[in-house]
Amino acid sequence: MTATTATEWEMVVGLEVHCELATATKLFCACRNAFGDEPNTNVCPVCLGLPGSLPVLNRHAVELAMRVGLALHSSVEPSLFHRKNYFYPDMPKDYQVSQYDEPLNVGGWLDLPDGSRVGVTRAHMEEDTGKTTHVGGGGGRIHGADHSLVDYNRAGVPLVEIVSEPDIRSSEQAKAYVNELRAILVAIGASDARMEEGSLRIDANVSLRRPGAEAFGTRAEIKNLNSVRSLGRALEYEVRRQAGRLEAGEPVVQETRHWNEDEGRTSSMRSKEEAYDYRYFPEPDLVPLAPSDEWLAGVRAALPVLPADRRVALAAAAGVAGTDPAVATVVHLGLDDLVLAAVAAGAGGRLALNRAANELAHGAVPDAAAFAGVLRMEGDGRLTATQAKAVLAELVASGGDPEAIAKAKGFEALDGGVVAAAVDAAIAAAPEEWARFVAGEAKVAGFFVGKVMAATAGKADGKAVTALLRERMADR
Ligand code: ADP
Ligand code: MG
Ligand code: ZN
């Protein structure tokens, strides 16, 4: 395979994300919507497609799908269900009910922590298929398997399929998109978005083009991506594969490819189906879906503040850029209220973000007032960074008052004068090193910091000592 570099080819990616909605029951019947139950126990004539049974649309599923649309800034529109006909054994009805050319949620976008925006084409409702397990021989694939087992518990579970515009340009951005989407789905209570349980499934469409080119290249659609990590690996593999073909003068074939996690490569599954293969026609047993304005307004009013808006508010309060990585981390950890409270109580925004992102990633969350207290002590120079982290760790482990903890640990406030005197003494005692420092040998600062630390029993702040050394040099 020909080696390639990112500058030679631009990756173009659009993602189709299937998300199972967190309803109690299925989309068109009263069967339980649950993961992990004994196979074929949550089934009835409706989801098994027995003759004479009729679907009844689940109102809660529609409401959750509307939440998804509103959270993605889509326009929620009157929509229609169609039958998508096909003959895999995973759908006992031989068709899947799905929204086709008139989806519930039209257009929209999603803002990522790095400041980029990915367009959303549509987010439509459909029912999930059953789950087929291929047994023996083929490594879980149908080719070479001895037989297949099918579980219809999942058949008829409500899904929203979120289709992105082909706006994604790197595997990192693709992963960030999925992570952001998951955070939104969980925040609005639409789905548990657990990829390991299949409640969130991704198909990745990827093509290459020369940087600066207008037209998109031919795409391959990759299936069987079971984690965000697999998505990234599969895209990186696919870029190398497609670049290899293009550079050898061979076309990329439009097809569906299967990601093999163990082998770390994709392989051809089947040529791409076209819409006409599915012979879509309107579902005659369901009326058009047209949520009233009141219903829509109620759903909108009940939405929580979304991660992107929380990042904007947090960055503004902390006085940092919205794209600051610590902002995304703090929101991801759900520590934004803690940081906002600390800033309101007089702590520095930068310091509060960094300490929350780095020191509170695991374990319990400290009391907001105590968190603000230790940050103020550090900000005022009464604690060094190392001391502040130690006090914070103690606060997280057993709570308490930061002043008292600092005192118990012997972190007495060091008078600025004591540090200055120790710096002066260190300079006087080492004229040779001082001459080297003054001559521009910056690393000698470490020698002086060490001397001052020794003289102050480790209580001086290294940064403050270095600043004093520079002052002394400028004052010579
Ligand atoms: P289909 O109906 O065949 O699945 P769509 O036009 O709905 O095709 O596109 C499916 C997905 O493929 C969307 O996420 C879209 O952004 C993406 N996509 C379309 N064209 C390309 C391309 N040339 N390269 C990468 N992704 C693409
Ligand atoms: Mg598709
Ligand atoms: Zn059922």
Image (cartoon, helix red, strand yellow):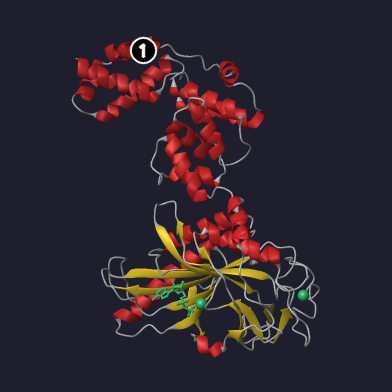
Q: Nearer the viewer, residue 405 or 2?
A: 405
Q: Which amino acid does the dot numbered 1 rest on?
A: Ala
The crowd level at tag 1 (other Cα within 10 Å; few <14, some 14-19, many 20+) is many
Residue drawn where x is 28% and y is 66% of the image:
7
Q: Nearer the viewer, residue 46 or 87?
A: 46
Residue drawn where x is 57% and y is 89% of the image:
279
Task: Where is residue 239? Give x, y as percent.
Answer: 39, 72
**Could you tell me if residue 1 is visible in this image?**
no
Question: Would you identify the image quadrant in which residue 215 lies?
Answer: bottom left
Task: Where is residue 465? Give x, y as percent.
Answer: 35, 21
**Which residue position holds label 1?**
422
Q: Nearer the viewer, residue 451 or 303?
A: 303
Q: Is 461 left, or right, of 91 in this rendering? A: left
Question: Would you identify the image quadrant in which residue 249 lies?
Answer: bottom left
Whether 463 is drawn above or below 62: the answer is above
Quarter of the picture holding the C terminus: top left
Task: Where is residue 269? Give x, y as percent.
Answer: 52, 84
Task: Where is residue 394? Give x, y as percent.
Answer: 61, 28
Whether 398 is drawn above or below 209: the answer is above
Q: Is 404 left, or right, of 255 in this rendering? A: right
Quarter of the picture holding the N terminus: bottom left
Q: Nearer the viewer, residue 471 or 129?
A: 129
Whether 254 is drawn above or below 77: the answer is below
Q: Is mark 1 within 8 Å of ligand 1?
A: no
Whether 388 is drawn above or below 231: the answer is above
Residue drawn where x is 62% and y is 75% of the image:
288
**Could you tell me if residue 231 is visible in this image?**
yes
Describe the element under mark 1 as helix, strand or loop: helix
